[in-house]
């Protein structure tokens, strides 16, 4: 017995020593994006909202003839699944358990002739009708819910639809009023709108045509014959469509140029958005209130994928529960899901052959809590089931949509326990606190999510309460500030008048306060600055240092609404470079140029003149920084206006200062200013070139020294 036990123990030890560890890699990583400054956004991993349950292929469906080249998948209100099997010219209908229910392939049309599909690419089902895009036959064929033929909707005949136009319907959607919306792969005017009888009523959602300024200018000089031979500028076409229960249309566009999509992602015009939400009139009504544009992958430049570059190529869109919607990226086989406001809820998916990976993603559809993703490479679809995390997320959205705010807070709190980086949860809690009157707490949650719009609304209420509390003190403070500023300007004027008549050497105080005379009287001010020695280099240095400190204070003291990312900007070297670099670049370029064109000012005169012109920046930026802590989003434009006035004021002073310093006429002053700006560009170019060459030289010498060291 003991011997048997010893042998068993020995075998157990050997198994532990020589066993090969096996781990199953996840098919994908679910993630969202951080709400960091532009160009610094990065992916943040989150719990899975969906996990793969099974892959449904032709064998599982019970098909004798395997599916080939599936192009669309649709789920009706009874959870039946419809697949457009293009190569086999049929529509495969499955029950809710993905077993074959029936096939629509051949039918008898209204002329009593046996008919069939030719590469059907899209399918849509209403409460009583199945609509099939018979693409290569240039028509839409309708059936009842049992698959019995009803009628054909042929190519529309309308003055709006050109006679020589090619009609290839690839996607169709029908609203609650039986209006038919059709996407044709060869139609560039937008989405076709037809009545239930197939009568065309117009186009909606036509894409913007992109023409460069150079092309517009060139067309003005072309003859009629040349313009006729020039390639036409046509808008990009839609490639897929779906519709909500309320009749709002989601449509995707895959043919927009990558540069235009990138521009949209980085804050450009929404007319280049690859996914749009339209109303029945064709107006773009999509909410894009998230931190990133709803366009699929946004940090594609950081992905280590040499074979896949550029922004997402969107090929389908599906409407999910609680006003959520999902788009799929054909390039990366990913699914991106957003809420109604355009906030990214989660993204997942990957290329591959493992369960949960999609080789060639083609279409997506919701089946209750499940998500069905069509793979045209493997001729199958994958069923993803919603996880506990996904269920909590949807319940929180449902409570928020139903205005059950206290319950929504519970849901968002549970989300944060599982995903502390989920910004939408912070916003959801903030909204609930705002509606309950807890504005200070709401501001804290909005701030955690970098949501300045809602933060501003909560701050309005806090500011309103603060104003009502100190209503008598505020006018007193304003009067004190106005009187103090007036007294200071009167004192500066008095000192400047006394210094103008007094002889002898100027005091430092007189040199410094003379700047307040220059900014209001630039012609005689700059004349006396140069010829009467009313200013000095030491005063100029103090003004430059004050300007640097002003911009540094702006970076650390600005209010949250105007500077959400103050940490990234509050670096002294940034403030120093932002003042000194343009100042000395302009001074150097101007002095070099005016030396060749009879300028009378020295380099010192130029630096002093520019420095004294910086006073308006100080006078405007300090109040702007203080007031930025007291304004709302709507009032930020007032601060921007004051800042712009300060910059323009300084620019005018610099221009007039150079004119007076060099004794130039207006025309010569304008030409030398333009030349100075060009000179600044050349100096920067040669500076960068020299630094690059110097770096390469240092690297070369270092490599030689290291090589000699190795050989010795």
Image (cartoon, helix red, strand yellow):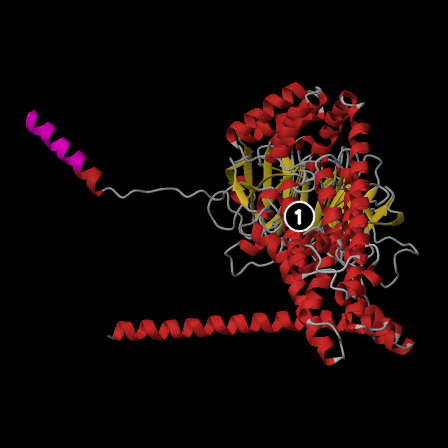
> Picture coordinates of residue 454 (x, y %)?
71, 32
- Whether the magenta-drawn stretch holds residue 4 is answered as yes
The secondary structure that most of the magenta stretch takes on is helix
| Above or below, 563 relative to 225 | above
Quarter of the view holding residue 416: top right
Relative to 4, 318 lies left or right: right
Q: Examine the rendering and report whether any part of residue 150 can be seen.
A: no
| Above or below, 308 relative to 145 | below
> Picture coordinates of residue 85 (x, y %)?
64, 49
User: Which secondary structure, mark 1?
Assistant: helix
User: What residue is drawn where x is 59% and y is 53%?
Assistant: 574
Relative to 395, 6 lies left or right: left
Relative to 1, 569 lies left or right: right
Q: Which range of residues does the magenta coloring cover?
A: 1-13
Front one among 95 and 357: 357
- Residue designated by label 1: 550
Front one among 602 and 279: 602
Q: Quadrant of the N terminus?
A: top left
| Above or below, 246 relative to 23 | above
């Amino acid at each position: 017995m003991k011997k048997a036990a010893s042998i068993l123990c020995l075998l157990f030890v050997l198994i532990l020593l020589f066993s090969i560890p096996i781990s199953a890699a996840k098919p994908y990583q679910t993630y969202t994006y951080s709400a960091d400054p532009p160009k610094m956004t990065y992916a943040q991993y989150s719990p899975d909202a969906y996990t793969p349950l099974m892959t449904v292929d032709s064998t599982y469906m019970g098909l004798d003839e395997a599916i080939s080249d599936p192009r669309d998948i649709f789920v009706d209100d009874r959870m039946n699944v419809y697949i457009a099997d293009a190569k086999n010219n049929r529509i495969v209908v499955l029950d809710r358990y993905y077993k074959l229910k029936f096939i629509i392939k051949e039918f008898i049309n209204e002329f009593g002739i046996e008919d069939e599909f030719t590469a059907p690419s899209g399918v849509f089902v209403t409460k009583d009708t199945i609509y099939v895009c018979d693409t290569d036959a240039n028509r839409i064929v309708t059936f009842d819910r049992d698959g019995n033929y009803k009628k054909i909707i042929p190519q529309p005949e309308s003055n709006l639809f050109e006679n020589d136009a090619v009609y290839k319907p690839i996607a169709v959607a029908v609203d609650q009023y039986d209006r038919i919306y059709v996407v044709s792969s060869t139609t560039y005017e937008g989405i076709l709108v037809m009545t239930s009888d197939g009568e065309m009523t117009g186009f909606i959602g036509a894409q913007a045509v992109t023409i460069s300024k150079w092309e517009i200018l060139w067309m003005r000089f072309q003859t009629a014959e040349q313009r006729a031979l020039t390639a036409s500028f046509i808008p990009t076409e839609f490639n897929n469509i779906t519709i909500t229960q309320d009749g709002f249309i989601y449509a995707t566009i895959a043919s927009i140029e990558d540069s235009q999509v990138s521009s949209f992602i980085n804050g450009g015009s929404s007319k280049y958005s690859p996914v749009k939400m339209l109303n029945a009139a064709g107006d773009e009504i999509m909410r894009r209130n998230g931190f990133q544009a709803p366009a699929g992958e946004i940090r594609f430049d950081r992905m280590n994928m040499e074979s896949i570059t550029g922004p997402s190529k969107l090929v389908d869109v599906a409407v999910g529960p609680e006003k959520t919607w999902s788009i799929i990226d054909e390039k990366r086989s990913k699914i991106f899901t957003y809420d109604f406001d355009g906030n990214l809820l989660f993204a997942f998916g990957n290329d591959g052959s493992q369960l949960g990976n999609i080789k060639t993603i083609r279409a997506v559809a919701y089946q209750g809590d499940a998500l069905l993703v069509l793979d045209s490479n493997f001729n199958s679809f994958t069923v993803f089931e919603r996880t506990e995390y996904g269920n909590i997320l949807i319940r929180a959205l449902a409570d928020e949509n139903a205005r059950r705010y206290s319950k929504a807070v519970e849901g968002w709190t549970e989300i944060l326990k599982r995903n502390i980086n989920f910004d939408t949860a912070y916003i959801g809690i903030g909204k609930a606190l705002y509606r309950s009157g807890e504005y200070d707490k709401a501001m804290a949650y909005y701030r955690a999510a970098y949501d300045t719009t809602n933060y501003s609304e909560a701050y309005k209420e806090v500011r309103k309460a603060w104003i009502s509390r100190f209503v008598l003190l505020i006018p007193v403070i304003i009067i004190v500030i106005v009187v103090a500023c007036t007294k200071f300007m009167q004192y500066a004027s008095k000192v400047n008048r006394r210094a103008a008549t007094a002889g002898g050497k100027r005091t430092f105080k007189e040199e410094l306060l003379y700047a307040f005379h220059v900014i209001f009287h630039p012609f005689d001010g700059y004349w006396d600055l140069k010829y009467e020695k009313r200013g000095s280099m030491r005063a100029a240095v103090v003004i430059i240092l004050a300007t640097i400190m002003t911009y540094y204070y702006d970076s650390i003291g600005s209010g949250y609404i105007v500077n959400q990312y103050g940490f990234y900007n509050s670096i002294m070297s940034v403030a120093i470079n932002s003042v000194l670099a343009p100042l000395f670049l302009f001074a150097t370029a101007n002095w070099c140029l005016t030396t060749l064109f009879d300028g009378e000012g020295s380099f010192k005169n130029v630096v002093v003149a520019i420095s004294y012109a910086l006073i308006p920046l100080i006078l405007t930026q300090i109040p702007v920084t203080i007031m930025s802590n007291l304004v709302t989003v709507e009032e930020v434009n007032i601060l921007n206006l004051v800042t712009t006035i300060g910059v323009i004021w300084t620019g005018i002073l610099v221009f007039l200062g150079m004119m007076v310093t060099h004794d130039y006429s207006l025309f010569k002053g304008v030409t030398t200013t333009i030349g100075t700006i060009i000179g600044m560009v050349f100096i920067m170019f040669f500076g960068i070139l020299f630094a690059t060459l110097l770096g390469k030289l240092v690297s070369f010498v270092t490599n030689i020294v290291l090589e000699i060291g190795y050989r010795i």
